[in-house]
Image (cartoon, rainbow, N blue to C red):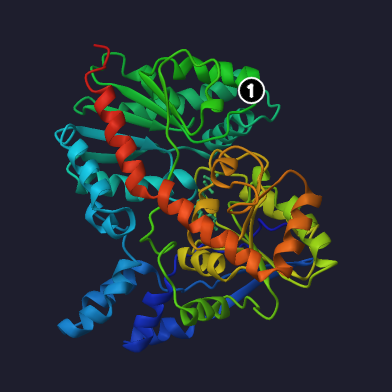
Amino acid sequence: MACDGSRVRPQIAHRDLNVFKALQSSPTDADSQRNSQREPARFGTFGHLTVLALRAGEGCVSSAISTVARAESAQRMSEIAPVVERSTLGLHTLEQYEPLIGAAVTERIAKKADRVRTQHVVHVSSTFNGGGVSEILTPLTLMMNAIGIETGWRMIQGTPGFFSCTKKIHNALQGEKVSFSDAEKSVYEEVVAENALRLHLDECDAVIVHDPQPLPLIRHFADRDMPWLWQCHIDLSSPDRAAWDYARGFVEDYDLAIFSLPEYSDGVGIERRFVMPAIDPFSAKNSELSDDEIDACLTYYSIPTDRPLVVQVSRFDRWKDPIGVIEAFRKAREQVDCTLVLVGNGATDDPEGDVILETIQSSIDEHVIVVKVDDAVLVNALQRRAAVVLQKSIREGFGLTVTEAMWKGAAVIGGNVGGIRRQIQDGENGFLVGSIDEAANRMVQLLRNPALRERLGSRAKESVRERFLMSRLLEDWVDLLAISEGRGRA
Ligand code: UDP
């Protein structure tokens, strides 16, 4: 049975557990009505695939916030502060990082920022929702503004034809053999040209373009007198040559190219810099959750906790190897009883998710739960409760899901590729694996040894604190803006 028709289509919904709880504690009539609908629905059983999602009528975060805003007393407002915290975009200042990174570091960053405080910069990407780029830009752009750099974030719009083309480019750059017709290249370039017409980027001091989707924009700003930077977030370690040559034609019009790792930048004929992503430790996805909150969230989604959980969180994408995850899990389960939970959301610029979801349905069994929903608190709860977190990618530009799980002290098994191997030191703060058998063996080892999980997890958390918090990324951007100042072409 296909999972893309009207019969069964998992709905993507935003939900915040604490907003949900706050609403329950002071229900209005409308709220009561909505709450009565807030049972998770099993959206279908495809063979052995169980997809959980939310019913239509699920209250959305914005309606929840307006209810919160009606709260009358100051005391009530202070009680609901965490609710608001977890339901907004997450504006955090550098000072809030002080307990995590120390005053000397925050002061150093603030001092460096003095050099670029007068700048007005604009980031351009292809989605506000889903995937690592939006996950990074949400806190980063807010923090840049909070420190005094006037920072905007613009999105380019696309058509289904455009996004199927850009997904092909993405896949080709990650190593798949793909051929592009001239018609596809025309769609790609034309849609970017249409977007260029209304972007009006002439007044800023730097433009930062993310990933291949908006890459050709630069061709439409030939008279620019500010630096244009291209930041690539994908794994370019072994790209399809023809596709990379095509993309590089655009890249080399930029003033600077930024990659997550040096090995992604072979043969690029312009100045390059290397910046690894980072996470926001205060976001709904990464902040502390109590055991009760975790229990409530997992119960809400009918995720059983009677057996140890093995969890992978990622878009339904071939490079995340969901089929390999299921095979490894099956092998591990021959030795240790456990439940696998695969959680994935969609990204508006990624049209392949449903196809991959369909592929999974024929190859899993009843111990595998697949949840297609966009819920940061669920990701948080699962990463905290999991006995083992997997990220068995076969290509991975960086892998924020690895960072997020490590920050929670989880024992993580990651594919030995790209950015994952920059985060996990094998045997030190997690395990790296290169095959299904290795993944299965490590799963069994970890499931049988809670002390080992604890040891790896606590080192994992410390390594994220040292290297992968948003404050470090802010500092990298302050440095980048300082070195690129005045580099435009005019
Ligand atoms: N993500 C999420 N819900 C999901 C799947 C992914 O919120 O169901 C988030 C995940 O927590 C991470 C981002 O999407 O913050 C994915 O970034 P990553 O670098 O791991 O992979 P990408 O999707 O960019 O390839």
Residue 74 visible within the image: yes
Q: Where is residue 467 in the image (x, y as percent from the top left)?
A: 43, 46
- Please name the residue shown 54% across and 73% down the image: 55
Q: What element carries label 1?
A: loop
Whole-percent x, y for residue 446 in the image: 70, 63
Decide if residue 383 is on the left or right side of residue 102. right
Amino acid identity at mark 1: Phe
Residue at position x 48%, y 64% in the image = 375
Q: Considering depth in this image, is 258 or 373 the residue closer to the camera?
A: 258
Q: Nearer the viewer, residue 231 or 127?
A: 231
Q: In this view, does 230 lie above or below 31?
A: above
Answer with the quarter of the image where residue 487 lies: top left
Percent of width and height locating residue 220: 35, 19
Q: Quadrant of residue 9?
A: bottom right
The N terminus sits in image quarter: bottom right
Left or right of 271, for residue 184: right
Q: Which residue is drawn at 55% across and 27% down?
A: 264
Q: Reply above or below: 49 against 295.
A: above
Q: Residue at x 48, y 58 (%)?
A: 461
Number of labels in the image equals 1
Evaluate whether residue 406 shows in this view.
Answer: no
Give the residue number, with chain letter if any, for mark 1. Answer: 180
Q: In this view, does 278 lie to the left or right of 114?
A: right
Above or below, 362 relative to 167: below
- Mark 1 CB within 8 Å of ligand 1: no
